[in-house]
Image: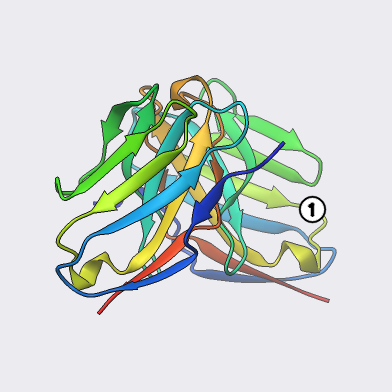
Amino acid sequence: DQQVKQNSPSLSVQEGRISILNCDYTNSMFDYFLWYKKYPAEGPTFLISISSIKDKNEDGRFTVFLNKSAKHLSLHIVPSQPGDSAVYFCAASEDSGYALNFGKGTSLLVTP
Amino acid sequence: ETGVTQSPTHLIKTRGQQVTLRCSSQSGHNTVSWYQQALGQGPQFIFQYYREEENGRGNFPPRFSGLQFPNYSSELNVNALELDDSALYLCASSSQGGKNTEAFFGQGTRLTVV
């Protein structure tokens, strides 16, 4: 039972434009959300997180938006760079905090 | 500051065998979690160790077991290997019992069961 869903397996964006990656969740107990980036043959790298008490968190080129009523979050990357090409995973955890529930990932390709 | 390291990086085992995977947590982190990532899927939570005790477990059978040592390093043991156990096994370390803190992952161990 997939509680975190990333419905777009892949996304292609031109360098300099905005990349928007989407994530939906079904468990209303989730209160902490994270995005990870993964290159081939490497482990996931933490990118940015957001607590359920916020609706936006920004870190440089990366911004995460959380819409609790819609159970939806998105990651915006602007401007996109070729080095951003990777698989992006959305993850969420409940109040207990011990388990991260991951989506299946979205493969982002940023073309020059 | 050293990151999370896992060993070995690749492993091939025969069905029915047992395997032990190892993880050294990031400096200053006291919590280790293990995840299984099958091909084309996101990582699935196996269990977490905090202060040498299991602190939560996902939907995995008892033949998946673990240990955490006083230096916070950890082992994942899988008995009676099955073909479906073939996957990338990821270790992640975090602090404060893993609650609402980002977890940092190692590069993973690719296990192939034949």
- Residue A24, image x, y percentages: 43, 47
Q: Quick one: label 1, few (<14), some, or many (20+) residues within 10 Å?
A: some
Which residue is denoted by mark 1 in the rendering? A78
Q: How many marks?
A: 1
Residue at 53% from the left image edge and 38% from the top image edge: B25
- Residue B99, image x, y percentages: 46, 23
Residue at 73% from the left image edge and 35% from the top image edge: A58
Report helix, strand or loop for mark 1: loop
> In this orientation, does residue A89 appear?
yes
Q: Is residue B92 left or right of residue B28?
A: left
How are the colours assigned in the image? rainbow
Quadrant including the C terminus of chain A: bottom right
- Residue B54, image x, y percentages: 29, 29
Q: Quadrant of residue A107?
A: bottom right
Chain hosting mark 1: A
In the displayed structure, would residue A31 be above or below residue A7?
above
In the displayed structure, would residue A67 be above or below residue A8?
above
Residue found at the far bottom of this picture: B114
Q: Is residue B3 left or right of residue B90?
A: right
Given the image, on which type of amino acid does mark 1 rest? Val
In the displayed structure, would residue B50 be above or below residue A18?
above
Residue at 55% from the left image edge and 71% from the top image edge: A10
Residue B18 vs residue A95, the one in the foreground: B18
Residue A71 vs residue A36, the one in the foreground: A36
